[in-house]
Image (tube, grey):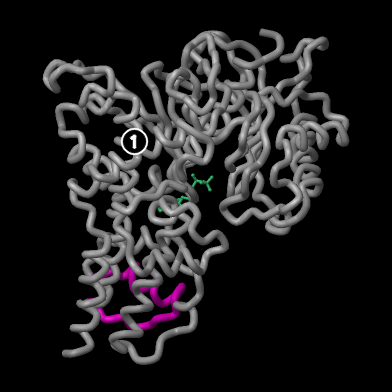
């Protein structure tokens, strides 16, 4: 019937629009490497900010002592205490306390937010045993993970460039973030030094490196997405005269804002972007991360039902932005019951579309598949872009010079974290598949993606240890 034809047409258009052949992915890889160069060459030279972190040595397992970390991410807020014994151990002894961030604080004032954080931290510390871990003449030291773009001046200072992920505290933009925390700690009479300001990707890299010294980059794919990696300081042209003992510095790419005309973009992406609070911003993130995938799917289903009129009048729920969250979309995608019961349930309970025929449920699963596959393949292309920039993609890099077969590919570890990667099996499988396709199996077998857990927390404590004033 005509209605089904229209459903099929919308599906076909989405499939074509999201097409990510290996050829196209390689163009994205090249574009990523080019933009990385541009972002390192001059301030504002690229949509990739390529932020300096002033972290030039990564933890290696010899760190000792008790350190703290605070993590302010997007959904929750965590306080941690990590005990380090000076020898690398596979499990790091630590305690965590986690709390949701009260919604109203996300758009309040910096004082309100940091007073809340400092109070929570104080409570956490007061629950400490007998305090015997710390000698009395030593101040407590803390790594502060702040997963928003920051322009750092040193490892322990930096100003907020802009908010992302739903936060909007206007008086904090361009303000020194660790100073805000340090002042709030003083107001609560908590004697503690903010030793390192850490982007969550950098924490993840630090933890990855602590466990495995072949770790050269890290990627986060959760509510948002971002990556960082170890760059040679002589490659950081925009900051002349930068000297570090190691010759390297971790660069926070802020890759969520990457953009290239090679990205497979659909009308749904354009609408999502223009209706978002940050249009023309975070374009890569809006095609990849958990905050958005469910909503892309919702938009496709909405268009299908509107254009085909296959179920008659549509529910008003389906028109509500972000009502279909990515974990629900994943549950539909991964529904393996023969009658797609879970798909039917979610469509009914969340989107208030009852009695969806099996044929249409199958189409919905296909839409989830198309959207997730594109996201995973783009993330893979981004990772290979980093590998290309640092000469670990098997092509010999800029200095390699030799024929492809001459190049000995080094074992290369990328630390990965985030709910989308670790919780969504099909996403992860598509990502690995694309890595293999782009790199070829001979090279891909040297590239290891390792999931770290709570790198943004534990990694920050490790960085506080390596940047301790008692070292
Ligand atoms: P955050 O990025 O908010 O700090 P996480 O890394 O845990 O925290 O990522 C959480 C996000 O990951 C969620 O917002 C959701 O979009 C996505 N996510 C978590 N679990 C799943 C899952 N099982 N399937 C799909 N997406 C998931």
Q: Quadrant of the C terminus?
A: top right
Would you say 142 lies left or right of 93 here? right
Q: Identify residue for label 1.
A: 33
Q: Compared to 223, does 215 lie above or below? A: above
Q: Compared to 92, does 75 lie above or below? A: below
Residue 397 coordinates in the image, percent (x, y): 27, 23
Q: Say which of 279 and 434 sits in front.
A: 279
- How many residues crowd around disc 1 within 10 Å: few (fewer than 14), some, or many (20 or more)? many
Residue at (29%, 52%) from the top-left corner?
262
Q: Say which of 89 and 384 sits in front.
A: 384
Asked whether the viewer can see residue 378, the reply is: yes
Which region of the structure is painted magenta?
Answer: 339-358
Residue at (40%, 30%) from the top-left corner?
415
Residue 289 coordinates in the image, percent (x, y): 43, 52
Asked whether the viewer can see residue 418, the reply is: no
Residue 350 coordinates in the image, percent (x, y): 46, 73
Was residue 349 drawn as part of the magenta stretch in this picture? yes
Would you say 349 lies left or right of 167 here? left
Q: Quadrant of the N terminus?
A: bottom left
Would you say 67 lies left or right of 447 here? right
Residue at (69%, 29%) from the top-left corner?
157
């Amino acid at each position: 019937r005509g209605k089904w034809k229209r459903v099929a047409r919308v599906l076909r258009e989405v499939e074509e629009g999201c097409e990510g052949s290996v050829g196209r992915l390689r163009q994205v890889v090249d574009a990523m490497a080019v933009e990385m160069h541009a972002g390192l060459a001059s301030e504002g030279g690229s949509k990739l900010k390529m932020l300096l972190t002033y972290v030039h040595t990564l933890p290696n397992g010899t760190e000792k002592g008790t350190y703290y970390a605070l993590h302010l991410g997007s959904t929750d807020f965590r306080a941690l205490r990590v005990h380090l014994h000076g020898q690398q151990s596979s499990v790091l002894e630590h305690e965590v306390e986690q709390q949701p961030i009260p919604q109203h604080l996300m758009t309040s004032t910096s004082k309100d937010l940091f007073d809340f954080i400092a109070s929570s931290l104080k409570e956490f510390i007061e629950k400490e045993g007998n305090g015997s871990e710390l000698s009395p003449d030593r101040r407590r030291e803390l790594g502060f993970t702040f997963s928003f773009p920051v322009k750092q001046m040193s490892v322990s200072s930096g100003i907020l460039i802009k908010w992302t992920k739903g936060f909007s505290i206007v008086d904090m933009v361009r303000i020194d973030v660790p100073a805000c925390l340090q002042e709030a700690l003083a107001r609560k009479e908590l004697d503690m030094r903010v030793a390192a300001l850490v982007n969550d990707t950098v924490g993840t890299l630090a933890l990855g490196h602590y466990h495995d010294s072949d770790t050269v980059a890290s990627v986060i794919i959760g509510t948002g997405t971002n990556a960082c990696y170890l760059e040679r300081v002589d490659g950081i042209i925009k900051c002349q005269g930068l000297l570090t003992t190691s010759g390297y510095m971790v660069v926070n790419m802020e890759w969520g804002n990457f953009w290239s005309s090679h990205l497979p973009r659909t009308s749904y992406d354009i609408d999502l972007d223009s209706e978002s609070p940050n249009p023309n911003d975070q374009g890569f993130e809006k095609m990849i991360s958990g905050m958005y995938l469910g909503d892309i799917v919702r938009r496709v289903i909405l268009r299908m039902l509107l254009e085909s009129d296959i179920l008659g009048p549509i529910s008003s729920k389906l028109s509500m932005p972000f009502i279909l969250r990515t974990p629900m979309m994943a549950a539909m995608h991964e529904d393996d019951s023969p009658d797609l019961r879970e798909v039917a349930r979610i469509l009914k309970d969340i989107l208030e579309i009852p009695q969806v025929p099996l044929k249409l449920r199958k189409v919905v699963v296909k839409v989830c598949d198309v959207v997730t596959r594109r996201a995973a393949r783009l993330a893979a292309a981004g990772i290979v872009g980093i590998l290309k920039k640092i000469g670990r993609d098997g092509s010999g890099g800029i200095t390699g010079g030799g024929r492809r077969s001459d190049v000995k590919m080094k074992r290369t570890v990328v630390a990965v974290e985030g709910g989308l990667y670790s919780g969504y099996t099909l996403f992860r499988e598509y990502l690995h598949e694309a890595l293999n396709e782009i790199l070829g199996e001979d090279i891909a077998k040297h590239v290891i993606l390792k999931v770290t857990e709570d790198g943004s927390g534990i990694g920050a404590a490790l960085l506080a240890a390596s940047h301790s004033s008692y070292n």
